[in-house]
Image: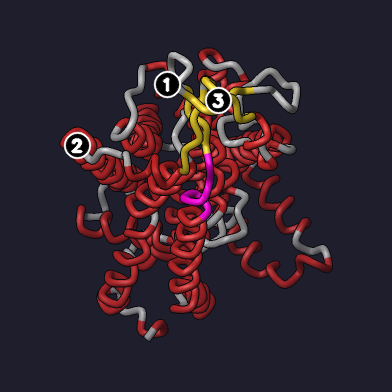
Amino acid sequence: MEEQHDILKNSFKPWKIWLAVGLGLLIAAILLFSGVRQVQFIKVKDGKGDYAWRDSNKNGKIDIHNRHEFMAVPQGDYIKQHASDALKQLEWTGSSFMWIFIAVLFMVGRDLFYMIRIRVLTRKKLSWKSSFLVIMLWEFASALSPGVVGGAAVAMFILNREKIPLGRSTAIVFITTMMDNLFYVLLIPLVFLFIDSSSLFPENTIFSLGVQWVFWIGFSIILIACLFLFFAVFILPSWSAWFLNTLFKLPFLKRWKGGVSRTAEDLIVSSKELRKEPLSFWGKTFLFTCCSWICRYLVINALLQAFLHLGIMDHILILGKQLVLWIFMLISPTPGGSGVAEYAFGELLMPFGMSAAMLAGIAVLWRLISYFPYLFIGAILLPRWVKRTGQSALK
């Protein structure tokens, strides 16, 4: 019990909240500042421009942000424009505000489907209010944790404090992680049916160096984790428990041996419980997982639609690029992927022709909608939740 108190206290320390908020705001400011200073070249008709493209790097592709790609000439095909000028030209129409509102609705839908999923997994032992609190605090923990860690480790204790037995809480966390990974693993092949791999990754930038390797290594890790969780929970829970206990006997892992031993025991209990569930239970769980993730991804699509006129194939391409973006957020060492998310966002979506300043601004909107609210909502809800669940050790 005391260990649970310590885990929750360490996960919700005030300095972690301010670090996450500060990093996000700092990176957003840097991106906006550098974006406004950037120069881009815009194509014009009838020789009314001052520059011509000359393909200085011999790659046959026009990089509108590369000064060395263009030379001053009379009656050229391009004009030079500062990104700040392009940002000023951004028109906030009624359609823009409508799509931003739709983006917010997608975020609400994402959390709503998470709430429905958690009620399915707990056999409706959680009320709607408790489900809301669990999801918000779960996301709060994720926002404060590095992407590679996430909030899953804290989630089982949050569920346990909502009077869900620890074995079932552990099972729920394992299943949600497996379902999330399964959705990602199944979606990747579908995306590659419609999109050429060369279109998914940024070109001619420092960011492109090794990006495909990182993506496929990350994808492989997610696939292995998904398979491990499936076998660990459904096929060989006893072997999995033995493997974890043996692994954490190694000298550099011994400090976590006690916690892992209890997790291994919970794993066996969870497996017995989950094997009794009918097929409809798993169908509903995966359906709501898919709905939640689709809503998550459509937030960016809606934000880009607010300022661009995109076709169906453009939206599919944006969806594919988000799968690449998610890998970098997942491996980020910063809380909630702060910094990494904003930078990767701009690099991956630059081919859609928007200026760096515009992309930086949309990245800020995206994080304001999809990340920062959880920090503030969680900070407000946590004290009340602590009081309600009798978690006096956090006071």
Q: Residue at x 32, y 67 (%)?
A: 376
Measured along the vertical axis of the image, is residue 82 above or below residue 379? above
Relative to residue 332, is residue 278 drawn left or right?
left
The x and y percentages for residue 192 are 56, 18
Q: Between disc 2 and disc 1, whose residue precedes?
A: 2
Compute the Cα span from label 1 to label 3: 17 Å
* Residue underneath mark 2: 93
Q: Residue at x 31, y 34 (%)?
A: 307
Helix or strand or loop: what does disc 1 sit on? helix
Q: Amino acid at mark 2?
A: Thr
The x and y percentages for residue 252 are 80, 67
The x and y percentages for residue 360 are 45, 47
Q: Is residue 35 magenta?
A: yes
Measured along the vertical axis of the image, is residue 337 above or below residue 72? below
Q: Which residues are magenta?
A: 34-39
Q: Between disc 1 and disc 3, whose residue precedes?
A: 3
Compute the Cα span from label 2 to label 1: 21 Å
* Residue 381 falls in image quadrant: bottom left
Question: Overall secondary structure of the magenta stretch?
Answer: helix
Front-most of residues 274 and 184: 184
Q: Amino acid at mark 3?
A: Ile
Report crowding for label 1: few under 14, some 14 to 19, many 20 or more residues within 10 A (C-alpha): few
Q: Between disc 2 and disc 3, whose residue precedes?
A: 2
Q: Residue at x 45, y 21 (%)?
A: 48
* Residue underneath mark 3: 188
Pick out the residue farthest to the right: 251
The x and y percentages for residue 204 are 67, 32
The reply to whether callout 2 and callout 3 are in contact (CB within 8 Å) is no
Q: Residue at x 36, y 17 (%)?
A: 311
* Residue underneath mark 1: 314
* Residue 333 falls in image quadrant: bottom right
Q: Amino acid at mark 1?
A: Asp
